[in-house]
């Protein structure tokens, strides 16, 4: 299996070098996406209603790397996979909020498409890692 698809950062395919959740490429990308959304939100003028949508998007985005970290440290095997499934669902929710932010004019379509593509890639990586663990 391609290490990028499984979200594992490893130089030797036979010996994974995962000592921390931060070694997981999927965590790195999810964390980067969450920070990008947060920074983007700070640059926009928002009504109260707009801010509520941003809050939802940011919350679901940060939930992804947080659940990866929690599962990595407190669980193993199938239980870790359950945390990854929660992360995958939260990434799908993040993608939805990005669609909404584009439709209400808070994010331009081109940027929204790039962010949604990143969400889909993170979902695929989480799926690969879940399959690898199970």
Image (spheres, rainbow, N blue to C red):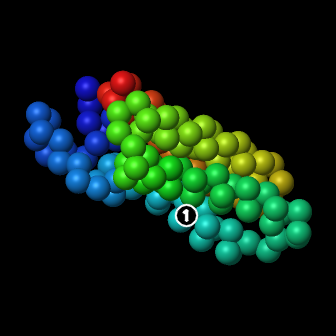
Foreground of the two, 48 or 18? 18
Q: On the rendered structure, is 47 left or right of 40?
A: right
- Please indicate, yes or no, whether residue 95 appears anywhere in the rendered image: no
Foreground of the two, 87 or 42? 87
The percent coordinates of residue 104 (x first, y second) are: 83, 54
User: The N terminus appears in which quarter of the rendering?
Assistant: top left
Q: On the rendered structure, is 58 left or right of 104?
A: left
Q: Which residue is mark 1?
A: 36
Residue at x 67%, y 75% (from the top left corner) = 42
The percent coordinates of residue 89 (x first, y second) are: 60, 37
Splitting the image into 4 quarters, where does residue 76 fall? top left
Residue at x 14%, y 45% (from the top left corner) = 11
Q: On the rendered structure, is 127 left or right of 106?
A: left
The percent coordinates of residue 17 (x first, y second) are: 17, 48
From what the image shows, is residue 55 above or below residue 12? below
Residue at x 56%, y 39% (from the top left corner) = 86
From what the image shows, is residue 38 above or below residue 130? below
User: The C terminus appears in which quarter of the rendering?
Assistant: top left
Total tally of numbered discs in the picture: 1
Residue at x 64%, y 47% (from the top left corner) = 94
Farthest-out residue, front: 74
Foreground of the two, 4 or 75? 75
From what the image shows, is residue 128 above or below residue 80? above
From what the image shows, is residue 64 above or below residue 41? above
The percent coordinates of residue 109 (x first, y second) are: 69, 50
Badge 1: residue crowd in 10 Å (few <14, some 14–19, many ≥20):
some
């Amino acid at each position: 299996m391609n290490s990028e698809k499984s979200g594992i950062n490893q130089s030797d395919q036979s010996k994974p070098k995962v000592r921390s959740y931060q070694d997981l490429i999927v965590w790195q990308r999810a964390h980067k996406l969450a920070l990008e959304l947060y920074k983007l939100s700070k640059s926009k003028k928002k009504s109260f209603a707009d801010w509520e949508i941003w809050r939802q998007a940011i919350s679901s985005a940060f939930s992804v790397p947080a659940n990866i970290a929690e599962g990595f440290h407190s669980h193993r095997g199938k239980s870790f996979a359950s945390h990854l499934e929660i992360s995958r669902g939260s990434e799908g929710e993040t993608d939805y909020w990005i669609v909404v932010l584009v439709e209400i004019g808070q994010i331009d379509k081109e940027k929204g498409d790039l962010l949604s593509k990143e969400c889909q890639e993170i979902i695929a990586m989480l799926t690969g890692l879940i399959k690898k663990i199970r």
